[in-house]
Every structure is written in structure tokens, then in C-alpha cells.
Image (tube, helix red, strand yellow):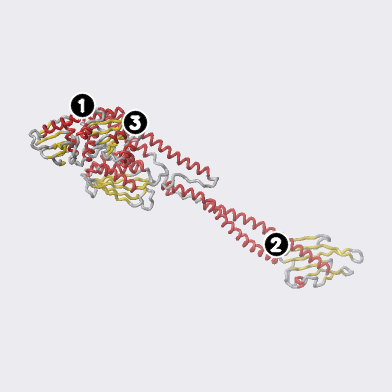
Amino acid sequence: MVKSGAHKKSPVSLRLRLILLAALVVAISLGLVGLVLDAAFHDSSEADLRARMESLVYLVLAATEVGVGGSLSVQDDPGDPRLGQPGSGIYAQVHGEQDQWASPSSLGVSLPVLPSIEPGETRFLVPDAKIGFYTFRYGVAFELPDERLLPVTVTILASPQEHELEVQIFRAGMSRSLGAVGVILVLAQLLFLSLGLRPLRRISRDIAGIESGNLQRIEDGYPMELDPLIRNLNHLLDTEKANQARYSNALDSLAHSLKTPLSVIRSSLPADTAARSDAVEHAVSDMQHLIATRLQRAAASTRRTMAQAVDVKAQVDRLIQSLARVYSQDLINIAGIIEPELAFYGEQRDLLELVGNLLDNACKYGGGQVRLSARALDPADPRAGLSLQVEDNGPGIAKGESEQLLRRGVRGDERAEGHGLGLAIVLEIVSAYNGEITIKESDLGGTSVSVLLRTR
Amino acid sequence: MRILLVEDDTGLQDSLAGILREAGYAVDVSGDGIEGLFFGEEYPLDLAIIDLGLPGLPGLDVIRKLREREKQFPILILTARSEWQDKVEGLESGADDYMTKPFHPEELKARVGALLRRSAGIAQPVIEFGPFKIDLASQRVHKDELEIELTTYEYKVFEYMLMHPDEVVTKTALSEHIYAEDADRDSNVIEVFVGRLRRKIDPQGLMNPIETLRGRGYRLNMQPQSS
């Protein structure tokens, strides 16, 4: 069993899918770019710091003097004002064999005690859990007058705060820039989507035009990528139309080729009713009934998926004028009460057949007053279907007989001409449209036949 | 009354022509749309029965062209297409009624009679005037409740005059409307029919129901009244 579409989650639109996907790709791309730029800046910033620390080492070395006995002395102002300013964030230490020196900037700052390193060795360390400073160490050896070598280690310590501040400033600037780029990219994506999806919106409009009957096929002028789709859709429409016409023609030919011989048989029967063969007469009637109802049902089942809107009032007016011509001598008054611009989204032939048979019956069996009312099944949804009511002021139908009347081929009134086929054909069409039919008494005094046709 | 039957199926054509002739109509037949149109334009017809699926020219086109050429006689469509779409198109093209195949011969005769009456402005199948009562369906004529026996041609003459109550009916018109095209016609025979008809419906010659207008023709001397 097919579940009703109402319970299904409605699928995400193509536009929303593309926007979400594009936004996701932009976000990931910009995030990766941010990470790469951040890492590059961090590395570059550290390299710069190292170079600056290395130059400070040379300043400190230049300010260091070694006494004859191996004593060390360092000028308190080696040449960089930050070394002389307490808590400046840049600190210098010089370790000899016996002496050590610390720059005035380290006053009041707890600096780590680091072991000496071999002369000629340099070490650059980034802050870690033990040492919370960038550290650049340089080992040198001073030659004493006694040709002894005095190993000295110069250590420059830099507080990470300055570096972190730089990184933070860079990150803030980068985030703003990447954010702006992201917004521009998303807006550009929206524009591309809008331009890219425009042909699809046009296809949708064209199909709506075909459904409403304003267009016969999807028009040309689509981008070459959509050309095969448009060609195939038009081919499908043409094929469907041609198939339907062929099917309809085949049914017509079949009807024609069967009905004419039946007419010959019937008109060749002896005119004297007593001598007429009842068996042949019944066989002819049965065959006629089968042709009319089976062919009609077969034709009704060819309802197209893309039905065009049929102007109900225009078609009903044609029927009323035709019937007024046929019943011109019976002074029948047919009133049509039809909602303005009411459309039927089914086959025009089915509407004509259904309303034609109902009106014809009302003209035949009624008392001269016929009223047809038509309205949309659901005012909010014009495609849902139609509600039709045909009433007359005739003798009406006795209670209990309406069910019998709704059976195929049962004549409601033997007085009038006809073969009892009208209502049978109406029933076939109502069934093809998954509709309903009810017969009751009309306030005009006669019969009221109500029909619902569903076109969804 | 003269009827044109345009039907391409020869079996049905023969059968229908036989039924109509038996009913007292003069019948011209054609199995082709072009020939049917020619007959419709050229013959003085009282009614045409036209099939829709015709070789040469479709029935709908035959009807349209006849109406375009201001032929006003009633047209009955005979069609195997029973759908309302076809019926409406047929009636819109200018036909007055339709019949779908297969049909009862009685129904055909009833429709033909109704259309002829309608075109003569007579509502009911029984016409009364003076002491006469004429049943157009059963083709019986009564005078003061007594049936008058008329031959087929006497009845045809009487019926045609009843259908044209206010007109002067010439002998030629009578001849044309009671005989088919291929019949031998002699206008003197019409005088014989009218003379015999007068004697049968007015034996004493007191009422003079059919007036002779010298050199012009005949005129019904009473106004029929539909019952």
C-alpha cells in the first residue's frame, strides 16, 4: 500500500542543499587557510624573535669583560634599553666559572637557573612547563692571558607575552579578513546559484504553463547542458499526446467498425415486433452496452499525468447550447451556476461526457427545469477536483431505486428514448476519477445527481 | 417529404433507405461526402441524415458547408461516435439532432418525424384542423373520428401541405418533395393525387380544404392546430 505523501518529510530544496554545501565548503576552506596562516605567522614570529635574541647575545658579549683571573664583568647597559628596565620582558644572564651576571631588567623577576653549555653551542628553546620563557643560549670561551679558556654562557630570556600578543593581534586581523572573504564567497555562491538555477525555475514555469494549457510544449532557449533534458521532455510530451490520440483513434475506429454492423443488424430485423427475435435484439443491446461502457472506461483510463486546465464554464455552455438545440421544442430551461474561472484538471472529453449525459438525462426525464451547479472540491486547491450537481423538476426517483439506477445499464424511465447508457458511462468516469456519486431529491422537485471528481 | 441520406456503409444505407421509404418519405441516397454536399445544395430537401465518418468530405464539413450556403432544412447526424465531444461538435457545426449507432429503426423514424414537425413549427405529432385529425407518426387521417384511407402518395401530398400551411405550394414543389431524384415525375399526376385527396377528405365538396390558385398551385384553406 502506498503511504500518503502528507506523512512524508518534505525533501530539502535543491537551492538550500547547494547553499548549505557551499557554505560548508567555504567554512572548511577558510578554516584550513586560517590554520595554515596562523602556523606560518607563529613560525615566522618565533624566527624573528630568535634573530632578535641572537643580536642581544652579541650586544651582551660586547659589553662583557673578562679579568686576568677569569672574573667576569658586564656593563649594566649593554646597549638595549629593555635590558635596563626591570620587568621589561627581556632578560640577559651571563654565567662564567665563578661569576654570573643578570641584566637589571631581571630585578624582581624569578628567572630559571639553567646549566652552562659548551662553547660554540647555541640553543633556542620555546616556553614549556618548566621554563616559561623563550630562551636563547650561546656558549663562548674567552682566552685568558695564561692561555686557559674560560667558558662563558650568555642566556637571553624573553617573556612569551609579547609574542602571544602579536599572535593574537594577527589572529584577530586574520579572522576579520577571512570572515569578510567568507561572506563575499557565500554571497557570490548565492548569486551563482540564482543564475545557475534560473533555467530550472524556467522549466518549472514552462511545465506549469503546459499544465494550465497556456503552452503546448517546453520552449527553446535553454543552456546547452539542459538541451538533452528539454528535448527528452518535449519528446515525452509529444509521444504521450500522439499515443493518446492514437489510442483514442483506435477506440473510435473500433467503435465505428462495431456499431455500423450492429446498426445494420438492428435495422434489418423485421419491423413487426411480434416477429422480431428477442434473442438477437438483446444480443445487439448487450454488445452496444459493452462497446459504450468498455470503450469509455478504456478512454477514461488514458488520463494524462500532465492534464491541462479545462474551462468548465466554456464547456458547460457548449453543452447547454447543444442541448437547447436538440430540445428546442420542449422549452427546456437549463441554468448553469458555475464558479467563475473554475477549471477541471482532467480530460475535456470526460467532463463533456459526464456533464452531457447528466444534463441529457435531466432534459429527457425532467419537467423542463434543469439546474447545473459546479464548484471546486477544495477552494484552497483548484487542482483537487470538482463537485457537480445536476437537478431537475421531473417526477424524481423513488426511494430505493437510486441504488438500482446506479447499476450499469438500468434505465430510469422506459418512456424516453435512449439505451440506459448515460448513467453507466457517468459511473465509469466517476470511477476513473476516484470520485463519488449520490442521487437524492432536489429542491426543484425532481432528481438531484451529485458527482465528485478527484483530479489529484 | 424528401430526405437525403448520406451513409457510406452500403448495407446500412440500403436498410435505412428502405425503412424511410416504407415510412412514406422520398429518399435520395449518397455514400460520399462530396456527392452528399452536392445533393444537399441542389435538391429541394426537407431533411438530411448525415453520417460523420464519410469518404470524400467528412460529415461535419458537409453540414458546415450546407449551413454556410444557407440551407435551412433540419439535419440529423448519424454517427458511431457516441461521445458528447463529437455530439457537441456536430451540433455546433449546424446539425439539429444526433443519433448514435446502433439505433432502433423506430427511434430513427421518431427523430425524423420530430425534426420535420419542428421545422414546420408543429409541436405535437397529432395535428387537428376543422373536423380532421392527422397523426403524423402513424400516418393516419381521421375525419369526425372516422379514418380516411389514403394511398402513400395521397398522404404525402396532404402531409406536405400541412407542413406548409401558409404557403402556396406549386405542383413542381409537391413533385420535388414527394419523389426522390431518380423517380419519374409527371406534374399531371400531382393533379390526380390532389383531386383524389379532395374527394376522399371532402366527398361532398362543402369545405374546400385544399384551394386551387390558378396558375400558381395549391393552398391549405384552414389553419392547422396542433393538439
Q: Which sits in the foreground, A260 or A135? A: A260
Q: CA distance from mark 1 to mark 2?
A: 124 Å
Q: Is residue A296 above or below residue A36?
A: above
Q: CA distance from mark 2 to mark 3?
A: 103 Å
Residue A354 image position (x, y, % from top left): 32, 42
Residue A430 image position (x, y, % from top left): 33, 42
Around disc 2, counting alpha carbons within 10 Å, would you say few (fewer than 14), some (14 to 19), or many (20 or more)? few
Q: Are marks 1 and 2 on the same chain?
A: yes
Residue A216 image position (x, y, % from top left): 44, 44
- At label 3, the amino acid type is Ser
For the question of whether residue B20 can be seen, the reply is no
Circle 2 residue: A129
Q: Is residue A123 above or below residue A232?
A: below
What mark, if any, has residue A257 been given in the picture? 3
For the question of whether residue B41 can be seen, the reply is yes
Label 2 marks a residue whose chain is A
Q: Foreground mark, 1 or 3?
A: 3
Q: CA distance from mark 1 to mark 3?
A: 28 Å
Q: Foreground mark, 1 or 2?
A: 1
Circle 1 residue: A275
What mark, if any, has residue B70 been given in the picture? none
Ranked by sequence position, the earlier of labels 1 and 2 is 2
- At label 2, the amino acid type is Ala
Label 3 marks a residue whose chain is A
- At label 1, the amino acid type is Ala
- Hey, which quadrant is residue A348 in on the image? top left
Around disc 1, counting alpha carbons within 10 Å, would you say few (fewer than 14), some (14 to 19), or many (20 or more)? few
